[in-house]
């Protein structure tokens, strides 16, 4: 469970030698979907997307920010 006003480092790595992002458009698709699902509850501080893994640093908004 994520807590309000806390920072989190979210990361993922592909299996084996596979790539998560095979084409430039895959990066754009990922960021668009990421924003769609997180914008209401989190503030993204930084991200780094690489072909086979990614890192995201985010802060969960306060309860007041989310309810507003």
Image: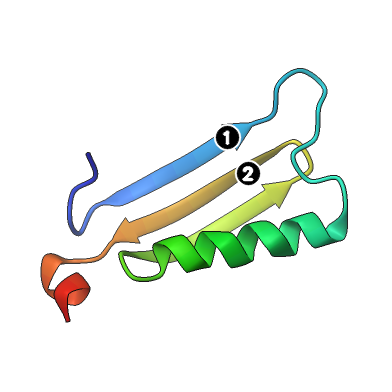
Instruction: Label 1, secondary structure: give it.
Output: strand
Q: Which residue is mark 2?
A: 54
Taking the spot 15% from the left edge, 74% from the top edge, the residue there is 67
**Quadrant that contains the N terminus:** top left
Residue 42 in the image, given as x and y percentages of width and height: 34, 63
Q: Which residue is mark 1?
A: 12
The foreground one among 23 and 10 is 23
Q: Residues within 10 Å of mark 1 (few under 14, many from 20)?
A: few
The foreground one among 46 and 13 is 13
Instruction: Label 2, secondary structure: give it.
Output: strand
Q: Residues within 10 Å of mark 2 (few under 14, many from 20)?
A: some
Q: Is residue 1 left or right of residue 39?
A: left
What is the tally of numbered marks visible in this picture?
A: 2
Taking the spot 20% from the left edge, 59% from the top edge, the residue there is 5
Taking the spot 51% from the left edge, 67% from the top edge, the residue there is 35
Q: Is residue 68 left or right of residue 19?
A: left
Colour setup of the view? rainbow
């Amino acid at each position: 469970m994520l807590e309000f006003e806390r920072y989190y480092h979210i990361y993922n790595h592909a299996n084996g030698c596979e790539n998560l992002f095979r084409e430039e458009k895959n990066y754009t698709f990922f960021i668009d979907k990421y924003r769609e699902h997180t914008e209401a509850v989190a503030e993204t501080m930084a991200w780094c997307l690489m072909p086979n893994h990614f890192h995201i640093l985010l802060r969960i908004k306060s309860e007041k920010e989310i309810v507003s």
